Image (spheres, rainbow, N blue to C red):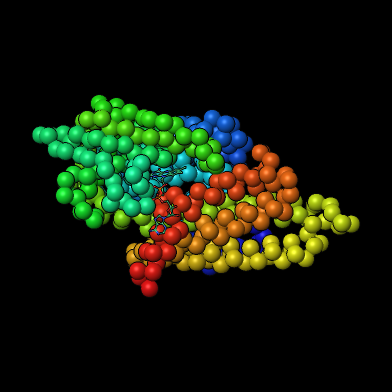
């Protein structure tokens, strides 16, 4: 990124800047050199989770009292953006489901006993986490969740399935939402559980081949009379939907951060390419139509980036960001997809060939306007609050 596009001075503390440097170094030295292999393997190796744990990067959003770094939403945004700037959306997804989308529920509503049991190994990366919300009957409309949990003495018996789950086949613990009341309607009657891989009655189903995010594992979770100790219920029974909603603002901010990074990587690659590619007696960059389009996209991305950091700062002050979080999740991925489209276009045939960074980035960006809240649903969330 050109220095003139650097807005960090307006938003970041010294601690944030050091964090950005640290993650950039990790990406350059330890992620990019191996990420093509992870794309082939369809997953991030366990050792990478542990490496992020060693560096303290798995606990940025966790309070110090829980063993985390007690940093703010801006720090989480930096982590997500810089992982995205690696140009590999799959590894970014696998790692950030762990850091920002699942285990934080323990910090938010876990008891001291639950935190002591799970968090130390989650923060070192010895335990890998996943989030189980989406079901075959629907992901956007969470009230359609059909997985049930019925209480029997000191156990909940889970029946049902979850689909399209990141880290499904590699995670050790799953943060799962299920119906605990036959009358569950609207947001009431759902509960949140920590389900351990060795739970009797738990299994994985299909492992999915995907358009993009090749470096992340995606699969199904199946619960067939799965016996989950009542001690693994998070918070109060019947409040699970509410807890999920509380986590969504942070997830949306982090998803927007990933898009910012991936889209910036696409722009960087395309600037380099168009400035070198010979055509019509000059280089592509000499053609005004291309130069102007890149200038417009860079402008829009910088505006989106500034907005995203403003929202993160608001979250860091403890202010609600429901509307802004939905705005980010609706707008930034749609912009990212427009940027990817043009960056592929200006790479010509090479932009469609496997192995070209913009080809991968365009596939990886495609999901971000669907997963974790489709744009249409997000615009509804915004409209409700206007
Ligand atoms: C690679 C990958 C990884 C994923 N990881 C996870 C994970 O870790 N955990 C997890 O729980 N889920 C995960 N998901 C699931 C993802 O969050 C859902 O796919 C997403 O929420 C959409 O749900 P759906 O697929 O059921 O689509 P549907 O809910 O059936 O919606 C289909 C489409 O209909 C449109 N639509 C829906 N509702 C409305 C509306 N109200 N107004 C207008 N249009 C609407 C949207 O365009 C939407 O994309 C993942 C998905 C993929 C592909």
Residue 60 in picture, x, y percent from top left: 41, 49
Q: Residue furthest bottom?
A: 386
**Residue beneath the point at 28% across and 46% down:** 145
**Residue beneath the point at 45% across and 58% down:** 375
Q: How many marks?
A: 0
Nearer the observer, 104 or 152:
152
Residue 275 in picture, x, y percent from top left: 78, 55
Q: Residue furthest left?
A: 153
Nearer the observer, 314 or 248:
248
- Relative height, residue 50 to residue 360 (above, below): above
Q: Is residue 298 visible?
A: yes
Nearer the observer, 372 or 43:
372
Q: Residue furthest right?
A: 281
**Residue beneath the point at 31% across and 51% down:** 142
When asked about the image quadrant of residue 352, the answer is top right
**Residue beneath the point at 28% across and 36% down:** 160
Residue 159 in picture, x, y percent from top left: 24, 35
Residue 260 in picture, x, y percent from top left: 55, 56
- Relative height, residue 155 to residue 7 (above, below): above
Q: Quadrant of the N terminus?
A: bottom right
- Relative height, residue 93 to residue 76 (above, below): above
Q: Quadrant of the C terminus?
A: bottom left
Q: Is residue 115 visible?
A: no
Image position of 266 (left or right of 106) = right
């Amino acid at each position: 990124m050109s220095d003139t596009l650097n807005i960090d001075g307006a938003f970041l503390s010294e601690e944030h800047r050091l964090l950005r440097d640290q993650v950039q170094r990790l990406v350059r030295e330890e992620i990019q050199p191996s990420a093509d292999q992870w794309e082939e393997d369809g997953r991030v190796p366990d050792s990478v989770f542990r490496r992020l744990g060693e560096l303290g990067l798995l606990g940025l959003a966790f309070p110090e009292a829980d063993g985390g770094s007690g940093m703010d939403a801006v720090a989480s945004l930096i982590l997500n953006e810089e992982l995205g700037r690696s140009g590999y959306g799959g590894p970014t997804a696998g790692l950030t489901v762990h850091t920002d989308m699942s285990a934080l529920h323990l910090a938010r509503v876990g008891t001291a006993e639950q935190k002591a049991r799970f968090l130390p190994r989650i923060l070192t990366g010895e335990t890998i986490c996943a989030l189980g919300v989406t079901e075959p009957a629907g992901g956007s409309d969470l009230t359609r969740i059909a997985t049930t949990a019925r209480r029997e003495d000191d156990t909940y018996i889970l029946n049902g399935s979850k689909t399209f789950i990141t880290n499904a086949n590699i995670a050790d613990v799953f943060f799962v939402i299920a119906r605990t009341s036959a009358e569950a309607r609207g947001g009431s009657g759902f509960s949140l559980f920590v389900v351990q891989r060795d739970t009797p009655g738990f299994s994985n189903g299909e492992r999915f081949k995907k358009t993009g995010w090749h470096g992340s594992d995606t699969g199904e979770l199946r619960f067939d009379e799965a016996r989950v100790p009542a001690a693994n219920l998070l918070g109060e029974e019947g409040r699970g939907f509410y807890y999920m909603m509380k986590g969504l603002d942070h997830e949306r901010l982090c998803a927007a951060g990933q898009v910012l990074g991936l889209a910036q990587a696409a722009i960087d690659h395309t600037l380099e390419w168009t400035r070198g590619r010979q055509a019509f007696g000059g280089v592509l960059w000499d053609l005004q139509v291309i130069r102007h389009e890149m200038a417009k996209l860079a402008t829009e991305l910088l505006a989106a980036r500034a907005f995203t950091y403003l929202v993160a700062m608001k979250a860091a002050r403890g202010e609600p960001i429901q509307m802004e979080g939905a705005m980010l999740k609706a707008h930034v991925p749609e912009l990212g997809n427009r940027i990817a489209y043009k960056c592929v276009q200006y790479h010509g045939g090479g932009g469609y060939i496997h192995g070209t960074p913009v080809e991968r980035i365009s596939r990886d960006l495609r999901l971000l306007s669907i997963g974790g809240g489709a744009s249409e649903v997000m615009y509804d969330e915004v409209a409700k609050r206007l």
